[in-house]
Structure formats: structure tokens, C-alpha cells
Image (spheres, rainbow, N blue to C red):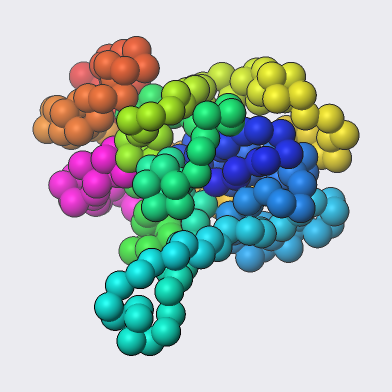
Amino acid sequence: MIVSKKNNFIFLKTAKTAGSSIEFYLSQFCGSKDTITSLRPIEEKLKKKFNILKKQNYEYKKNKFTLKNFKKFNFSKRIILNDHSSLKILEDKIKMNLNHYYTFAFVRNPYHWIVSYFWWYLYDEKILPMKNFNKLKKREISLLFKLFLQFKCLYFFTWMKDIISSNKYKVHIYKYENLEKDIVKLKHKLSLNNEKIRFGEIKLKELKFNSKIKYKLKFSQEDIKLIQKEAKFFFSEYNYSKQVPRIYLSKK
């Protein structure tokens, strides 16, 4: 997440939509009073190379008068924003007036979106060592994906919806599929000048496994129904087709 007082914008970072690259890119235009949440240590270190502002101002203190706090003589509560914090936290907990900010986020085709999160989840949660990725067989991948959907599909799409939801403010939604063009549009929209690094030059968090493994993942009819059910909001709200991409369909 970025809250830029300097340029009057809020970037809401959804997962698996190149969000870290976008936040890295936008950080170069920020000022000393802007909120920039933390990326991974290696990415924060890379910012130094380009003389780009690192994580800053992501901790807020709000007054809270309760009996428990009174006994401790502590009348403030810390609110720490993370990279995937929602707009509601700014609205309800920090109670920021966001009327003059241009708030935006990126979404993605739900089929590709959940698959991208699946591969990242296996890696990030250390479900499977990276050296074993390329050894997976189609049947093993199908089983892992089916189990993953049962436990994480509803959670993931609810999480993504919560990040961008607001009862008070408009959130401008851009699509991952138009990423490069939309970054250019945003740069002009927000009047971002003095670019130190172009967006296309930023390469972060790539999973280094054989790309052919991705073609082994095929959806069952149960997988398709579950994804369509749990991602209903994104299919309908952002006009994504429910037709399954051919890459995920088994050849008959």
C-alpha cells in the first residue's frame, strides 16, 4: 500500500497482480511524509540501489481511552499497515479523510489469478521445496490444486474483495491484463515526474521453476464450479468471461 500526500493517490496492493513491482515503481515518486508499506527485505534493499524511498510512515497511533489503557497509562493504540492492508483500515481505524485521493488497485482474470496464487502459496508456505516443483506429475498437481481450492479459494477472493471495498470512496480498478499500458496512463493521470526507473525494468519475486510445469495443471469440472462460485464478484463486477482458458483444459 502507498498513501501519497505528495501526489494525492492511494495504491491498494492486491496479491498476484504485480503489486510489489507497482509499489516499487510508485515509491520513486513519493515524498518524505508519504506512507509506503514494507516489501520483502531483498526488494527493500534493491530500492537503495536506485535511490528510491524505502518503507516509511506505515505505523499510526490513535488515541484510545479504555479502562485497560487507563490502568497502564497508555492512551494510544498502534495501527501498523502492511502491503495488503485494505481501504477500510484507513477509513474505519485510522479515520483518514480520503476525499481528495485518487484510489486505485489492480484485479485479474479469476482463473489465472487463483492459479498464480496456488503456485506462490506452495512456494511461500514451503509446502513443497522448489527443487521438487519440476518433478510433479499431472495427477499430483491436480490433487494439490483441488485441496488448495477447498481451503483457500473462498479465503483468497474474499481477501481480495476486502482490500478494494469501500462504503464511502470510489476505487478505480485497472486490469492486470493491461498492466503496462495502465501504468503509463496512471503516470500521466497522477502527473508523476522525474522517473528514475521504468516499470518494465523492475523484476521482482519470479518463481524460478520450469515454465512447462504450468501446463500440467488442468481444471476438473468441480474446480471450475468452485472458482466461478467464489470469484463471482470479480467475474460480474469487472466483466471477466467465465469461459475457461484453454491452458487449463484437458485435451479430449
Q: Is residue 241 left or right of residue 175?
A: left
Q: Position of residue 85 (x, y in %)?
A: 44, 49
Q: How many marks?
A: 0
Residue 40 in sight: yes
Quadrant the C terminus occupies: top left
Q: Nearer the viewer, residue 53 or 49?
A: 53
Give the farthest residue toward the left. 222
Q: Position of residue 138 (x, y in %)?
A: 28, 43
Q: Position of residue 246 (x, y in %)?
A: 34, 20
Image quadrant assignment for residue 122: bottom left
Q: Nearer the viewer, residue 106 or 167?
A: 167
Residue 133 in sight: no
Q: Nearer the viewer, residue 4 or 28?
A: 4
Note whether 51 is above or below 23 in the view shown. Answer: below
| Residue visible at 38% across and 87% down in the picture | 72
Q: Is residue 46 left or right of residue 242?
A: right
Give the magenta part as a residue range: 136-159
| Residue visible at 71% across and 57% down in the picture | 54
Image quadrant assignment for residue 214: top left
Note whether 246 is above or below 155 in the view shown. Answer: above
Q: Nearer the viewer, residue 143 or 60?
A: 60
Q: Position of residue 249 (x, y in %)?
A: 27, 24
Q: Is residue 43 magenta?
A: no
| Residue visible at 79% across and 34% down in the picture | 198
| Residue visible at 49% across and 57% down in the picture | 81
Note whether 211 is above or below 135 in the view shown. Answer: above
Majority SS type along the magenta span = helix
